[in-house]
Amino acid sequence: MRVARADVVGAHAATGVGRFQHGVPAPQVTPPAVVLAMLRLLDLPRGGSVYEVGTGSGFATAVLARAVGPAGRVHSVDRDAAVVDRAGRLLGPDPLAGTVTVAVADALREPPPDGPYDRLVAFLSVADGPPDLWTAAVRRGGRLVVPVRGTRRVVRYRVGEPGELVAEGGITATFTG
């Protein structure tokens, strides 16, 4: 059975980045081109589920919601309550906001709720690959896209057999903030 792929490029183009850049800036802002490149690495299924680490401005969250569509779900977390509140307000008017949950959580210490997910994307770098609690939250065959601290690399991983995480390439990216 062929799974319909999400149109990340179209979702990115349809999401007005300006709405997420005005007003008080988020503490970490990932350039829109990097957001697009990272989300393309996810190879999202239409109607799929995504766990996003690092809500930031909410722009990537909105792109993810459009990409997975009304049958999908996006759960985004950030440990900064002010960031989550601002992103929630900006996402509120979006017609796909009902597919999104934005919450305050420390993704490095708290396991993702409501898993397993099809995909996980992090806008938070890690030193030695994704933490075990992230890997455990993604179903077998799922993908994780994670920046590697101290490098300009973003790596895509595939979840294999229990305990198996396979690096499948990635991109070079420059983050700002």
Image (spheres, rainbow, N blue to C red):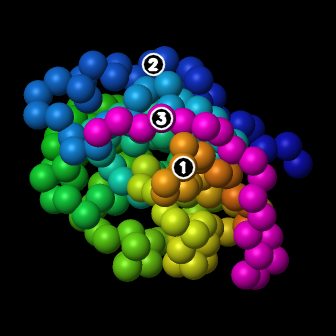
Horizontal and vertical percent for residue 112? 44, 72
Crowd tier of the residue under label 1, counting other residues whose Cα lies within 10 Å: few below 14, some 14–19, many 20 or above:
few
Tell me which residue sits at (44%, 78%) in the image: 111
Tell me which residue sits at (21%, 40%) in the image: 26
Q: Please give the residue where the numbered disc 3 appears in the rendered image.
A: 174
What is the distance, in whole Å, between disc 3 and disc 2 at their CAs? 23 Å
- Highlighted range, magenta: 160-177
Residue at disc 2, secondary structure: helix
Residue at disc 3, secondary structure: loop
Horizontal and vertical percent for residue 177? 29, 39
Horizontal and vertical percent for residue 135? 61, 72
Nearest the camera: 1 or 74?
74
Picture quarter containing residue 2? top right
Crowd tier of the residue under label 2, counting other residues whose Cα lies within 10 Å: few below 14, some 14–19, many 20 or above:
few
Magenta run includes residue 16:
no
Tell me which residue sits at (42%, 55%) in the image: 124
Nearer to us: label 3 or label 2: 3
Magenta run includes residue 168:
yes
Name the residue furthest right: 1
Q: Please give the residue where the numbered disc 2 appears in the rendered image.
A: 14
Q: Would residue 75 be seen by someone viewing this image from the given angle? A: no
Left or right for 12, reference 1: left
Residue type at the position of mark 3: Thr
Residue type at the position of mark 1: Thr
Nearer to us: label 2 or label 1: 1
Nearest the camera: 19 or 152?
152
Residue type at the position of mark 2: Ala
The disc, 1 or 3, on the residue closer to the chain's N-terminal end is: 1
The disc, 3 or 2, on the residue closer to the chain's N-terminal end is: 2
Look at the numbered discs 3 and 2 and tell me whether their residues touch, using CB distance below 8 Å: no
